[in-house]
Amino acid sequence: MCGDRKTAGNEKYLFGPVPSRRLGRSLGVDIVPHKACTLNCIYCQVGRTSKLTIRRKEYVPAKAVLDELKQRLAEGLQADYITISGSGEPTLNSRLGELIDGIRQITKIPIAIITNGTLLYRPDVRVDCAKADVVLPSLDAGTEEVFRKINRPHKSISIEKLVDGLCRFREEFSGQIWLEVFLVEGVNTDDAQVTAIKEAIGKICPDKVQLNTAVRPTAERGVERVDGKKLREIAAQFGDKAEVIVDFSQVISGKDVRTQAEDVLAMLKRRPCTIEDISAGLGISGKEALEFIQLLERQGVIDCEEKGGVRFFKAKEVL
C-alpha cells in the first residue's frame, strides 16, 4: 500500500526530472506500489513483479500527488513532460483520470503515460488514458506463445485482448500514440515473429514505433540485447514510422534539480543508472555523481551490476 512506500526526502510520488530517451526532460509520477503490474516481463528494469494483478483501485491518492506537484511547480519546475509511469503499471490506479484532470488545472506541461497497454480493452481505462497528450504503450510479441514467454501476463490477458484494446484506443484517441517494441535476441526477433508484430502494428496505426532492447540489468538473467544493425533492419521492415531509440546522453542543466545523495538514491529506486545517467538526470558533473555513488555504497543502500561492459547502479530492495 502507499503508506508503506519508502522514499528519499519529502517526495513520495514524484521523481526527476530525469533524462528520457523519448520524452526529453521528464518528471516522473509514480502512482502504483512496487511492483504491481499486469505483466511480469523478463526484461523489466524495475525487477520481477511481486503483485501480478488486473484489479484497479486507488493505490495512490490523487490529491497527495497533486499537492506534491504544486510544491515542485512553486519551486520552478522545468520539464518537457509530466510522465505517469514508475514502479508498476499506472493504469491499475483507478484515480488516473482524476489525476490527469488535476494536473491540467495547475500546469500546461504536456502529460504522457507510459503503459504496457494491457488494460486498454477496458472502456474506463481508455477514457482515462485519452486525457493525456501522449500515450506510450508496448507490444513485444505477435503470437500468444511469445507473448507468454516474454511478457508473462496475468492469466486473464491474451495477445488478442492486448491488440484489440490498442486498436480501440486508436479509434477513440486523437493524441499521439508511440508504440514501443522491446526486442530480446532469440525470443521475438525471428522472421515469423517480426512479421506477426508488423501485422499487429498495421492494425493499431500508432504515430511512432520505437524499438528498444536490453541495455540495463533485467528482471531475469540471460536476456540478450539485439545489436544495432539488426535493430535498424527490423525498424526498416516496420516502415517509415519506426525508429531505434537510444540512450539519452545529453547533459541537461537546470537550477531546480537538486544535487544531494538522496536525489541520486531516488533515481536508483526507479531504475538502474550509469554514472552518466545520474550526471545528465541531475545536471551535475560526473565527478559529483561518482562521489554520491561512493557515499551510497558506503551506506550499503545500492548495488552495482555490469551489463554489456557497462556498470549500472541500483537501489537495494527493502524487505
Image (cartoon, helix red, strand yellow):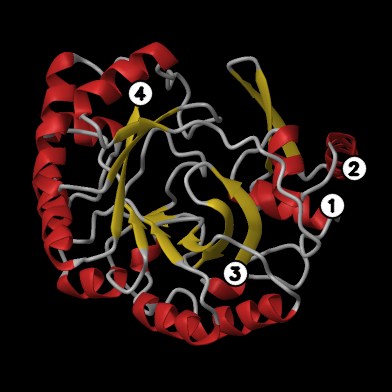
Q: Callout 1, which amino acid? A: Ala
Q: Callout 3, which amino acid? A: Tyr
Regarding mark 4 in the picture, which secondary structure is present there? loop
Drawn side of residue 261 relative to residue 315, left or right: right
Q: Callout 2, which amino acid? A: Leu
Regarding mark 3 in the picture, which secondary structure is present there? loop
- Pinpoint residue 211: horizontal percent, then vertical percent: 35, 32
Q: Callout 4, which amino acid? A: Val
Drawn side of residue 195 relative to residue 263, left or right: left
Q: CA distance from mark 1 to mark 4?
A: 34 Å
Label 3 or label 4, whichever comes before in sequence order: 3
Residue at x 84% of width, y 55% of height:
259
Number of other residues with Cα within 10 Å of mark 2, as a class: few under 14, some 14 to 19, many 20 or more: some
Residue at x 59% of width, y 69% of height:
13
Number of other residues with Cα within 10 Å of mark 4, as a class: few under 14, some 14 to 19, many 20 or more: many
Q: Are marks 2 and 1 in contact (CB under 8 Å)?
A: yes
Q: CA distance from mark 4 to mark 2?
A: 35 Å
Q: Does residue 15 appear anywhere in the picture? A: yes
Label of residue 295 in the image: 2
Depicted 78 relative to depicted 296: above or below? below
Give the mark count: 4
Q: CA distance from mark 1 to mark 3?
A: 18 Å
Quarter of the image for residue 169 reads bottom left
Label of residue 261 in the image: 1
Residue indicated by mark 4? 184
Q: Are marks 4 and 2 in contact (CB under 8 Å)?
A: no
Label of residue 13 in the image: 3
- Pinpoint residue 82: horizontal percent, then vertical percent: 52, 65
- Pinpoint residue 239: horizontal percent, then vertical percent: 21, 29
Residue at x 38% of width, y 71% of height:
93
Q: CA distance from mark 3 to mark 4?
A: 31 Å
Closer to us: 189 or 55? 189
